[in-house]
Image (cartoon, grey):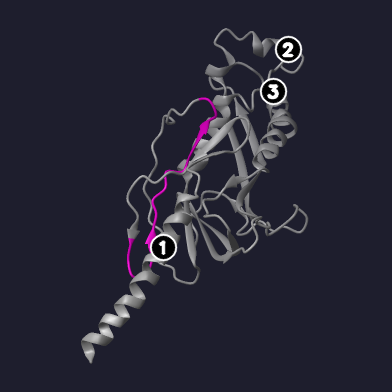
């Protein structure tokens, strides 16, 4: 009786397994590897190695690079490998390296999204006319924080300026002159650059997910060199995916601000 039973089980299970594999392939094939973020940049999260499939999980190694819209040249820095912590409480874990955010800032800078022209009315003439050039003598220290939240199917960031300090090494310029220029640049950053950057960042970075799959019960943790998104998945029967939130009101930036410190 054993052989007939095994034969019947194989005949029943094999088509089911094949259908599930085909459905998985179909879902994976719907993931767009090049996604336009806005009029300046696009995101490439194509596979860079074959998927690792085990009895307990499927591991996908995605590229995760932001490029200027008209230039797919890799940025002049390399990603640092990282390993996700061992977790099993959520259905999906997404690790996003610091390289991703560096590539995004470089792409927006290269595309000219944050270009600002400083007039002589905004900068003291005696600093502009410095023979060594302002860019060669100014030492700048800017401290910023990043708020992170998952809004719908996107990772949304918000920048804030904590501190901006300026110094002129080996210079006879008075502290008052340096402070005046420091205040000018700080105001430009606070009222010009950051609102412009946040307007772009509010559109969010699309997270890789197959069609009709949405994120629920999501959490964000910041580790040294990468952040970890832990989330469950929900299959949407409707064609349109409903975002988890519909506005900024009432949103809490999980785990506070990005400060480059590892999670405990």
Depth check: give the residue in front, 200 or 160: 200
Looking at the image, tell me whether mark 2 or mark 3 is earlier in sequence order: 2
Residue located beneath label 1 in the image: 85
> Looking at the image, which residue is at 52% across and 54% down?
209
- Give the image location of residue 184, x and y in percent: 72, 25
**Residue placed furthest toward the bottom:** 1
Highlighted magenta segment, given as a residue range: 53-70
> Looking at the image, which residue is at 66% across and 37% down?
200
| Location of residue 74 with respect to 201 vertically, above or below | above
Depth check: give the residue in front, 37 or 157: 37
> Looking at the image, which residue is at 39% across and 46% down?
47
Looking at the image, tell me whether mark 2 or mark 1 is earlier in sequence order: 1
- Give the image location of residue 86, x and y in percent: 40, 66
- Give the image location of residue 100, x and y in percent: 49, 42
Depth check: give the residue in front, 211 or 161: 211
Residue located beneath label 2 in the image: 120
């Amino acid at each position: 009786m054993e052989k007939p039973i095994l034969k019947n089980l194989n005949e029943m299970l094999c088509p089911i397994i094949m259908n599930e594999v085909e459905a998985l392939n179909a879902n994976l094939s719907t993931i767009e590897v090049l996604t336009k973020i806005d009029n300046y940049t696009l995101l490439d999260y194509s596979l860079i190695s074959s998927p690792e499939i085990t009895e307990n999980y499927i591991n996908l190694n995605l590229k995760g690079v932001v490029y200027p819209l008209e230039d797919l040249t890799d940025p002049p820095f390399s990603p640092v490998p990282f390993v996700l912590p061992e977790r099993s409480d959520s259905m999906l874990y997404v690790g996003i390296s610091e390289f991703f955010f560096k590539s995004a800032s470089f792409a927006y800078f290269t595309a000219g999204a944050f270009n600002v022209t400083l007039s002589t009315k905004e900068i003291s003439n005696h600093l502009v006319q410095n023979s060594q050039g302002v860019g060669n003598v100014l030492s700048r220290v800017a401290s910023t924080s990043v708020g992170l939240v998952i809004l719908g199917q996107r990772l949304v960031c918000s920048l804030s300026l904590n501190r901006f300090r300026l110094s002129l090494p080996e210079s006879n310029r008075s502290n008052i002159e340096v402070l005046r220029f420091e205040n000018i640049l700080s105001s430009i950053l606070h009222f010009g650059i950051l609102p412009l950057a946040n307007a772009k960042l509010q559109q969010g970075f699309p997270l890789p997910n197959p069609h009709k799959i949405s994120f629920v019960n999501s959490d964000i943790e910041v580790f040294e060199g990468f952040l970890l998104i832990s989330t469950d998945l929900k299959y949407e029967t409707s064609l349109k995916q409903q975002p988890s939130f519909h506005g900024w009101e009432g949103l809490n930036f999980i785990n506070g601000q990005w400060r480059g410190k590892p999670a405990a």
